[in-house]
Amino acid sequence: NKAEERLSCSYKGDDMQNGFNSRFLVEMLNNLSSDDVILEMSLPNRAVIYTPSDGLDEGEHVTMLVMPVMLNN
């Protein structure tokens, strides 16, 4: 089972490829009311932090962490 998706984004840094279990991503994103999400990543084999950019109640903070899967290039 393999899929590939390219997304528009604002990105600073070197090119990198990351792989994730789509079920984890869908579950995380379905629980947010935000249309935009901030992804913080350092290396392709390190955890990625997801934070909604809007849609939160006052005083509410949401941070989600997902581990990448190994890619066979």
Image (tube, grey):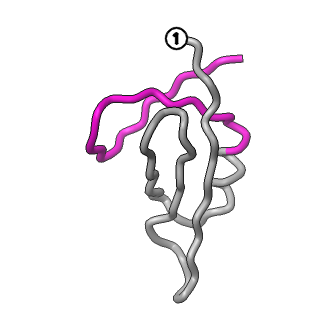
Q: Where is residue 8 in the image (x, y as percent from the top left)?
A: 36, 39
Q: What stretch is highlighted in magenta?
A: 1-24
Label 1 sits on what residue type? Answer: Asn
Dominant SS type (magenta): loop
Residue 42, given in percent of the width and then of the height, sits at: 42, 44
Q: How many marks?
A: 1
7 up-or-down from 48: above or below: above
Residue located at (68% from left, 34% from top):
21
Specify the quadrant that holds the N terminus: top right
Instruction: Tell whether 43 sits left or right of 4.
Output: left
In the picture of the structure, the residue carrying the numbered disc 1 is 73
Q: Which residue lies furthest to the top in this view?
A: 73
Q: For this rendering, which residue is in front, 73 or 46?
A: 46
Label 1: how many Cα within 10 Å (few below 14, some 14–19, many 20+): few
Query: Where 62 falls versus 67 (above or below)?
Result: below
**Residue 15's x, y, as percent?**
32, 29
Q: Where is residue 23 in the image (x, y as percent from the top left)?
A: 73, 39
Name the residue: 71% across, 50% down: 27
Residue 67 within the magenta-colored segment of the rendering: no
Relative horizontal placement of residue 16, taking residue 67 as reference (left or right): left
Q: 5 and 20: which one is in front? A: 20
Above/below status of 14 relative to 63: above
Q: What element carries label 1?
A: loop
Say which quarter of the image contains residue 26.
top right
72 vs 50, nearest the viewer = 72
Quick check: is 4 in the magenta stretch? yes
Relative placement, left or right, of 64 versus 16 is right
Image point 50% across, 64% down: which residue? 52
